[in-house]
Image (cartoon, rainbow, N blue to C red):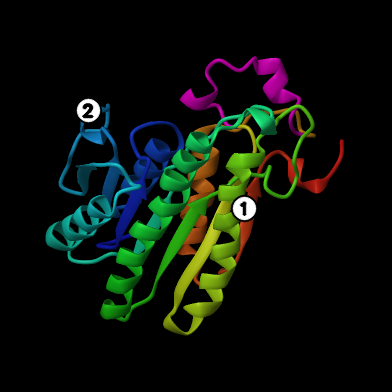
Amino acid sequence: MGKNKTVIVTGASQGIGAAVVQAFLDRDYNVVATSRSVSKGSTKPSPNLALVDGDVGQGATAENVAKTAIDKFGSIDHVVNNAGIFSAKPFTDFTIEDFRGLVSTNLEGFIFITQAAVRQMLSQGTGGSVTSITSSLVKNPISGVSASIPMITKGGLEAITLSLASEYAKNNIRFNAVAPGVVDTPLHNKSPKDFMKSLSPMGTVSDSRDIAEAVVYLAEARHVTGEVLHVDGGAHAGKW
């Protein structure tokens, strides 16, 4: 459990991010929650929660988040890289601006926050964990869900998760990912529910709390590193 441990959660204002914040607060962690406008959302500050507004794709945001964690709570023990953008359209319709936006949030956001956190974890000398939200579509694309360019970035997160798990294993800093399938979040509020249910063999749509529970598990699983945990109703298992 999280007595006095501090977690940074990006993309924290709604959907999976908000559920992750609540899951850690429920377990007595200190949480630093960040998104572009997290202070304007429904999550209210509390003694165990600090809210930091900012674009995760900007280095200054990571510096502010890390400073807030250390000044308010005294440590950085876990990071949840949840901030991400996603769009689906034919490969030839993606613009270079689309790509750069995806890179800024999904990859640069990961780099800035994770570098700041790892530096602090190394100075603390007590280990820690970094968990990133990717997608089951990285390894198991689905016909009819054209997300080639976003998956460059999500696939990159899975690749760096493995690299960093190896690089920092001796420092007891663990790197894992959760790969959701279809999740009922504001991101999908215009998607037909029957279509969403067709995207996994179980024929179910995950709730944000399902993803949050997987994130908490990986943060607390002392011997799990380099893992990609699929929470996708079996979509990663192959054709159905």
Residue highlighted by disc 2: 40
Label pair 1/2, CB-CB below 8 angstroms:
no
Q: Residue at x 55, y 77 (%)?
A: 166
x%, y% of residue 225?
Answer: 56, 69
x%, y% of residue 27?
Answer: 35, 51
- Quadrant containing the C terminus is top right
Q: Residue at x 71, y 19 (%)?
A: 195
x%, y% of residue 168?
Answer: 47, 78
- Tag of residue 35: none
For marks 1 and 2, the one nearer the N-term is 2
Q: Residue at x 55, y 26 (%)?
A: 184
Task: Tell me the amino acid under the disc marked 2.
Answer: Lys
Residue 223 seen in render: no
Tag 1 secondary structure: helix
User: Seen in the image, is 201 located left or right of residue 37?
Assistant: right
Task: Tell me the amino acid under the disc marked 1.
Answer: Gly
Residue highlighted by disc 1: 155
Distance (Cα) linking label 1 and label 2? 31 Å
Front-most of 204 and 41? 41
Span shown in magenta: 183-200
Q: Residues within 10 Å of mark 1 (few under 14, many from 20)?
A: some
x%, y% of residue 56?
Answer: 33, 46
176, above or below 193, in the image = below
Residue 127 seen in render: yes
User: Seen in the image, is 74 located left or right of residue 158?
Assistant: left
